[in-house]
Amino acid sequence: MASERRIGLDFDNTIISYDAVFLSQARELGFMSADFSGCKTQVRDAVRMLPNGERCWQQLQGRVYGKGIADARLVDGVDLFLRRCRRENISVYIVSHKTEFGHYDPELINLRDAARDWMKAQGFFHDGNYGISEGNVYFESTRHDKLERIALLGCSLFIDDLHEVLSDPAFPPGVERVLFARREAVSEAVPYAVCPTWHHIEEYVFRAREQG
């Protein structure tokens, strides 16, 4: 039955994009010059080249995922995917490996509360929008806990942007996996779908559903 299918989604860099926020916060912290431009990965690589680069990078992450999250945006295509899930009565769960507080954050902003506030602002929990239950959002302290949660929820499919998560030997067997990434970013053959956009993810997930 349609109502029995459960789809799990990662949060950071899967359904939420921080590219512009990483750049603006890096400039605000004085890590980047005003004329530097680039995506999250390019900002990360540049920050790590600074003196105490790893500490600077962790400080930047804390700022972005806490104070800066209000300026993050929904990844293109996620809205259409979530609306289709709702139309077809598919339960959606968000399961994220996210610490409670960021490193070197003097304001001690709760990163999990900040993420929930962002989802509320995007209409995730509103009946007139995506209609996801707030109780379907889980933040876990370790990757191991995240994988256990996916298994406990009985997800039939899970979407993540990290190859190392989906390829972890502890990933629950029987859960179909979809990697949100460009194919060229994966250097090895993987036993699951690789989709570069949410349009491709929607096509893959629902085509497979229709054929099944």
Image: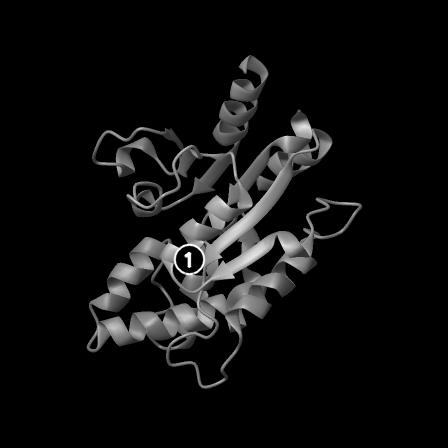
Query: Dot 1 surroundings within 10 Å: few (below 14), some, or many (20 or more)?
Result: some
In the image, residue 196 sits, relative to residue 129, either above or below, namely: above
The x, y position of residue 20, in whole percent, is: 46, 58
Q: Which residue is mark 1?
A: 145
Please state which of residues 51 and 191 is positioned toward the viewer in this rendering.
Answer: 191
Q: Please indicate whether residue 135 sits to the left or right of residue 71 in the image.
A: right
Q: Please indicate whether residue 211 sits to the left or right of residue 101 in the image.
A: right
Please state which of residues 197 and 170 is positioned toward the viewer in this rendering.
Answer: 170
Please state which of residues 202 and 69 is positioned toward the viewer in this rendering.
Answer: 202
The x, y position of residue 34, in whole percent, is: 38, 68
SS class, disc 1: helix
The x, y position of residue 184, in whole percent, is: 27, 33
Q: In the rendered picture of this protein, how many numbered marks are placed on residues?
A: 1
Image quarter where the N terminus lies is top right
Residue at (42%, 32%) from the top-left corner? 174
Image quarter where the C terminus lies is top right
Q: Residue furthest right?
A: 128
In the image, residue 70 sits, relative to residue 63, either above or below, namely: above
Q: Is residue 77 among what the camera can see?
A: no
Q: Residue furthest top?
A: 211
Task: Kindly indicate the quadrant of the structure image that contains residue 55.
Answer: bottom left
Colouring scheme, one of rainbow, by chain, secondary structure, one colour: one colour
The x, y position of residue 14, in whole percent, is: 47, 47
Three-letter code, disc 1: Asp
Q: Is residue 4 among what the camera can see?
A: yes
Residue at (28%, 43%) from the top-left corner? 169
Q: Residue furthest bottom?
A: 106
Residue at (45%, 86%) from the top-left corner? 106
